[in-house]
Amino acid sequence: MPCPSCNSSNIGIEDNLTVCYLCGIVINDAVFETNDFSYTQTNVKQIEQNQSGKHKRAIESVDRIATYFRIPENFATQAKNIIQEHSDDLPNRFPLETALFVVYFAAREWMLPWSINDLIENFPVPVDKAKVQRVNFIFVQKSFKYKMVQFELSQDTFDSFLDLILPGVAKQYGGTIKMSKSTSVKLKQTTKSLISLGDIYGLNTGKKSRPTIIATAIISFAYLGIYNKSNSLKSVKKSIYIGRRFSSFKRYFPSNSKILKMRMHDYIDFLLACAQNIPWIDNPEKRYTHYYLKDILDLFGKKDKDTDPLLTLSSDQYSTALIKKNDALSKVYKDMFDSVQKHLDSNTIPEDQHSLEFSLFQLIDFGYEKSHLINWSEKSIRGMADSLIFRAKYGTEVNQELDMNRRELDENDMLDDEIDIYIR
């Protein structure tokens, strides 16, 4: 097409505009036309194939996730369609995390009360939660409906989650699925009081809320069953260990029932310690601790924030398993430091050169302070000691005299290119 102004054929495209190079006039917007890339049915089919191939691994992961969690096929199909719909926006670098988020979104109502965190924690292959959150952010940018996905659902709050598990609690100890309104109200009050008492003694620190709520609800239900005329617990004194049905909570708590058992044992041990320090209870037994629950809550629990409990447990009377472990470890470390100091004073060396004591000896002898080392883990102590021993045995005079903490560089330091070889 010649230039309409000067009739020149010297025409080209600059910045998406068709211009005449002879007179400089802008003829029109550039239009990219070629038969090779026209929007034909053949090219549409090819584009769809490319898009499905792009997220092939994510689609395969959808099937794996759906199979593992026994999610119905219609939800898996819906998840695959979501991936295809947003194919251009989704990254291809973490297909497993993409698939897990999409599967949960498609089946979220069917999976209640599971949260997306439950899928992340219980899938047998490691899943990066940060990448799942990134996929979530990408979807939220595209549509507000994806904002409904919560990593922590409302079931994790006390009242809402306890309402969900009431049918499972009611089936414990030979009970039925029905629970009267008055019993459910008392159960909530007793469970909440027991959890609050556990908070005072650090029983719930670092523990997840769901197994704690379930375990305390079972104990509270066993206690309430003593005063329930329709319950067999009234006529025959029964152990708290007999008649439990952890399988009743599988839908509400996807993790292994072992965690529930551990939480129950934690609280039963705590209740036993309380019962042993109540003057009028003689020789309390662990399996019957729920019979003492009312006295324990009345004496050791707080009536309100400003009132102190009538009785308290000292650290000698009760400590959590973690505190006991830390105290025992602290004693071991103290004895070890004392032994190392004796070796240094007498100019001797610990006999076992593979022991932690020998590693401490090496570090203190090198110049490390005890106040510094006492906060180190065993792995850090052994690792640093092994590095110093290796350096002393195989190092040259030059690198043995190097100050590791200096900021200045010299000709003996490695170049960045050399360092990259080791950290690739």
Image: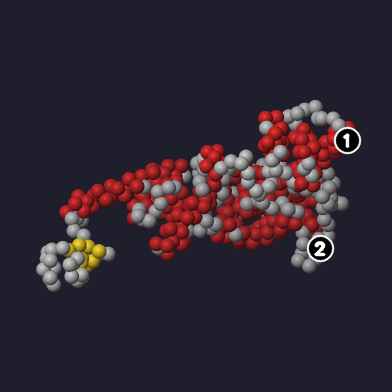
> Where the N terminus falls, by quadrant?
bottom left
Q: Which residue appears at 63% of the width and 52% of the height? A: 208
Relative to 28, say whether 224 is above or below. Answer: above
* Residue type at tag 2: Asp
SS for tag 2? Answer: loop
Q: Percent from the top left, x then y, of residue 271? A: 76, 49
Per the image, the residue denoted by label 2 is: 308
- Residue appearing at x 76%, y 66% in the figure: 305
Q: Quadrant of residue 40?
A: bottom left
> Callout 1, which amino acid?
Asp
In this view, the residue in front, 189 or 406, is 406
Judging depth in this view, the residue of 121 and 424 nearest the camera is 424
10 Å crowding of disc 1: few (<14), some (14-19), many (20+): few
Residue 336: x percent and y percent? Answer: 81, 37
Judging by the rendered image, the residue that carries numbered circle 1 is 345
Q: Residue at x 24, y 48 (%)?
A: 46
Q: Secondary structure at mark 1?
A: helix
Q: Is residue 409 left or right of residue 312?
A: left
The spot of residue 259 in percent (x, y) is 63, 44
